[in-house]
Each structure stands twice: as C-alpha cells, then as structure tokens.
Image (spheres, helix red, strand yellow):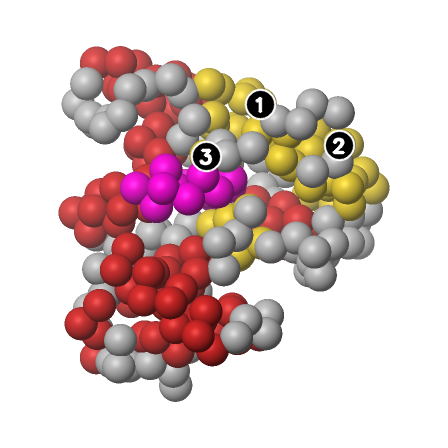
C-alpha cells in the first residue's frame, strides 16, 4: 500500500433500514492533505464521518487508516461535529485541555500544550473565561483549538462554519489553513459552501444525491493565499457548481 495514503475508503455502503445512503464509495485521502467534501443535504456526509469514527457500523466495505482498520484506542482522531459548540461549564483552557485530560496526558505537558494552542488560536488573554463570555468567533476558535490540542493525525470537520457570517468565516478559514500548514495534520472538511471548498481544499470530493456515490474528485492546485475573485478561482468554483446543480 502506498505510504502516502492516510485514509482508504473501499466500497463503503451504509443503509438505514430500507434507506440506502452511501452506495459503494471508494476514495483515498493522502497524508497531510486537506480534502473538502461537498454534496446535497441528506446525502450522507455526516454518516460518512460517523462511520470513520465508528459511531456507525458500515453496512459493507471498509475504512482503513495507515492501512489498518480504524482503532480509536490507537488512532488520534479529532471530530468537530456539525453545529458543535464548546462545553459551557468549562473555561476556555479547560475546553482545550479536555482531550488531553481524557488521554491521561500529565499535567505539566497539558499546561504546555494548552499554552501553545491558546497562542495559536489567539486566546491567550481569555483562558479563564467561560464560553458565554466570548464572541461567536472566539467560541469557534475554542472548538478548533480543542480539536488541534491533541495533535490529531486526522481532523474531521462537519460544516464548522456553517452558521457564521461571511467575514468571520473568511478569517477563521485563514486561521485554519495556518494551523493545518503548521501541524501537517490530515483534514476532511465537510461543507455546503462551494466557495469555501475551493478556498480551503487540495482536493474536492463531489457527492451525488442519495444513494450517494462520488461524482468527481477534483484536484485544486490554486496557489495560496487564495483570492475569491481571481479568474482561476472563479473557474474552479463554476466547475464544482456545474457538477453539483442539486437545486
Ligand atoms: N441514525 C440514523 N438512523 C436512520 N437514518 C439516519 C441516521 N443517520 C442518518 N440517517 C439518514 O441518512 C441520510 C443521510 O444523513 P446525513 O446526516 O449523513 O446527511 P448529510 O449529508 O450530513 O446532510 P446535511 O448536509 O443536511 O448535514 C438522511 O436521509 C438521514 O435521515
Ligand atoms: Mg450533515
């Protein structure tokens, strides 16, 4: 097996009773890549992420990480759920520390990791704050910080910026790209937003309506930092839009 492949999905199908959601899906995610997945509502994007993290058992097919079946004891996967927020009853630093604490990371190391993450997400002055005392973008940074704190080998993000206004989204997208480049983690990012997919991704996976198959895997070589009004950017955005046309 090619050692550059981080995640290999082979003939994955998922059915709920009579409802066929994922239909024989196969694709690879490369080590360190930023993959965006776009597809119509209800096509099975969340179902796919839930299958990676074993919340759902596939009806058939398999998902391998580094050539082996997913093992949540061994694989360090962070999952930002759709419309997830922070844990309200914890402060910023306790939120960020959470994943390290449940992994049994010693206190001194935890402290150091939390300091690093607070610095990265620009929340150094807010470690003792509770989420309700923060703005929407700061809360979203806590969520991202918590996901990066354990230095995940794989980061799954399910429409993390869906509810945010456009200006905020651009800012957080840039911050995410910075973090991704610094850490080299492999990211699977789900979005409805085609512009967002073109802005962030190295590859875009376009899914069909359910029963969902892969319509196309597109390579996105646009130079960074990307510019949404660059003609090449617009050309690629139009290409993806044409492929989808789910409205
Ligand atoms: N636990 C479940 N039991 C039964 N049906 C389910 C379950 N989870 C998901 N489904 C169904 O599977 C289909 C895909 O759902 P999923 O949440 O994966 O879609 P999605 O692509 O993430 O949609 P959205 O873009 O709206 O988030 C839907 O028709 C949904 O009703
Ligand atoms: Mg979903």
Is residue 200 or residue 39 the one in the foreground? 200
Q: What secondary structure is marked by label 2?
A: strand
Q: Nearer the viewer, mark 2 or mark 3?
A: 3
Answer yes or no: is residue 195 visible: yes
Residue 170 place in picture, x, y as percent: 22, 43
Residue in view at x 28 percent, y 55 percent: 120
Answer yes or no: is residue 47 visible: no
Q: What secondary structure is marked by label 3?
A: strand
* Residue at mark 2 to residue at mark 3: CA–CA distance: 19 Å
Residue in view at x 70 percent, y 56 percent: 74
Residue in view at x 40 percent, y 31 percent: 201
- Is 166 situated above or below 9? below
Magenta-tinted stretch: 178-194
Residue 22 place in picture, x, y as percent: 69, 39
Residue in view at x 73 percent, y 41 percent: 63
Residue 34 numbered mark, or none = 3
Residue 215 numbered mark, or none = 1
Task: Please tell me in which quadrant of the rendered image residue 93 appears.
Answer: bottom left
Which quadrant of the figure contains the C terminus? top left
Q: What secondary structure is marked by label 1?
A: strand
Is residue 188 or residue 110 the one in the foreground? 110
**Sequence-first disc among 1 and 3:** 3
* Residue at mark 1 to residue at mark 3: CA–CA distance: 19 Å
Is residue 95 or residue 161 the one in the foreground? 95
- The residue that mark 2 highlights is 10
* Residue 68 part of the magenta segment: no
């Amino acid at each position: 097996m090619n050692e550059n492949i981080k995640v290999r999905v082979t003939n994955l199908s998922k059915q709920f009773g009579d409802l066929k959601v994922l239909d024989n899906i196969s694709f690879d995610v490369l080590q360190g890549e930023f993959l965006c997945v776009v597809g119509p509502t209800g096509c099975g994007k969340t179902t796919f992420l839930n299958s990676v993290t074993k919340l759902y058992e596939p009806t058939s097919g398999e998902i391998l990480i580094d050539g082996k079946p997913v093992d949540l004891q061994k694989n360090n996967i962070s999952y930002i759920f759709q419309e997830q927020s922070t844990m309200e009853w914890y402060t910023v630093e306790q939120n960020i520390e959470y994943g390290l604490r449940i992994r049994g990371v010693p206190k001194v190391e935890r402290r150091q990791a939390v300091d690093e993450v607070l610095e990265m997400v620009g929340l150094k002055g807010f470690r003792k704050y509770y989420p309700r005392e923060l703005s929407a973008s700061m809360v979203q940074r806590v969520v991202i910080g918590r996901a990066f704190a354990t230095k995940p080998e794989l980061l799954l993000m399910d429409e993390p910026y869906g509810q945010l206004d456009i200006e905020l989204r651009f800012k957080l997208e840039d911050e995410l790209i910075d973090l991704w480049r610094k850490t080299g983690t492999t990211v699977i990012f789900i979005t409805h937003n085609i512009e967002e997919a073109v802005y962030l991704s190295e590859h875009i996976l376009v899914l069909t309506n359910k029963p969902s198959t892969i319509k196309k895997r597109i390579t996105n070589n646009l130079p960074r930092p990307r510019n949404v009004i660059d003609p090449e950017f617009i050309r690629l955005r139009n290409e993806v839009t044409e492929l989808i046309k789910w409205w």
